[in-house]
Amino acid sequence: MNNNALAFFGNMANSQDLHQNSVKLAKNSDFSLYDSEFIMKYADHNSDLLDLGTGTGLVVNKIYKNVKSITAVEPYGNFTKFIVNSENITIVNEDIFSFTPDKKFDLLTLIGVMNYFNEYEAIEVYRRYFPFLKEAGKIIIKNQFGVHEDVNISGFSEELGQDYYSQYRHIDKEVKILRSVGYAWVEVFDIYPAECNRWGNTHFYALVAGK
């Protein structure tokens, strides 16, 4: 499933009309200010962050001045050209499944990313990066989740004008997955105002978990 999602974003990265907000698929859906403010509840000037699936830097560009360092992992260089040039930002143009960090981090962030992995891929992502969190470190995951059950989207989107793939897993399932990987605690936050949630069967949540 992630290969299909990568192909979708690969087409976007090569578009002549690419701009920083291209990764926000629905019009008026840039909620990155909410995301950045939420992240900073768990970070400060001493924090080393690992951001997976950074995209065009909508969140990273808002928080880099307030943290020690950010390692931004994004496979598409055309996306990362929108990230600010700063000494405390390291850009890695590599796939999440192939990148191996060389240090441990205080905070791992996955903002609008995990719905592009199916359940088995998600487990692998969480397992892969668990060892690279410090003992007091935390992981933050934010995206839409299924309200009553898993919601799978696969096929042509009239709104986007191309094929689109996403799995919005039931929120309770994602909590169980994180616990199964080894996280000792998981908290769920209703991160956005109600009007930001367009659909009745999915809802934006932020999950915060720690060892």
Image (cartoon, rainbow, N blue to C red):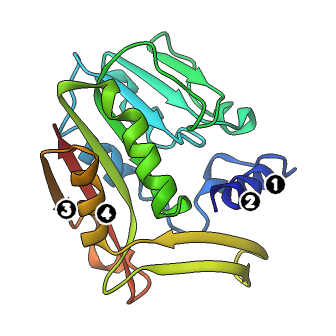
Q: Which amino acid type corresponds to the residue marked 4 in the rendered image? A: Glu
Q: Which residue is mark 1?
A: 11
Q: Are marks 4 and 3 in contact (CB under 8 Å)?
A: no
101 relative position to 139: left or right: right
Q: Which amino acid type corresponds to the residue marked 1 in the rendered image? A: Asn
Whether residue 27 is visible to the viewer of this picture, yes or no, is no
Q: Are marks 2 and 3 in contact (CB under 8 Å)?
A: no
Q: Which residue is mark 4?
A: 174
Neighbor class of circle 1 (other Cα within 10 Å; few <14, some 14-19, many 20+) is few
Q: Which residue is mark 3?
A: 189
The image shows residue 130, relative to residue 190, as above or below, that is above
x, y percent for residue 96: 56, 37
Counting residues from the start of the chain, the first of labels 4 and 3 encountered is 4
Neighbor class of circle 3 (other Cα within 10 Å; few <14, some 14-19, many 20+) is few
Whether residue 151 is visible to the viewer of this picture, yes or no, is yes
Q: Which residue is mark 2?
A: 8
x, y percent for residue 185: 12, 49
Total tally of numbered discs in the picture: 4
Neighbor class of circle 2 (other Cα within 10 Å; few <14, some 14-19, many 20+) is some
Counting residues from the start of the chain, the first of labels 4 and 1 encountered is 1
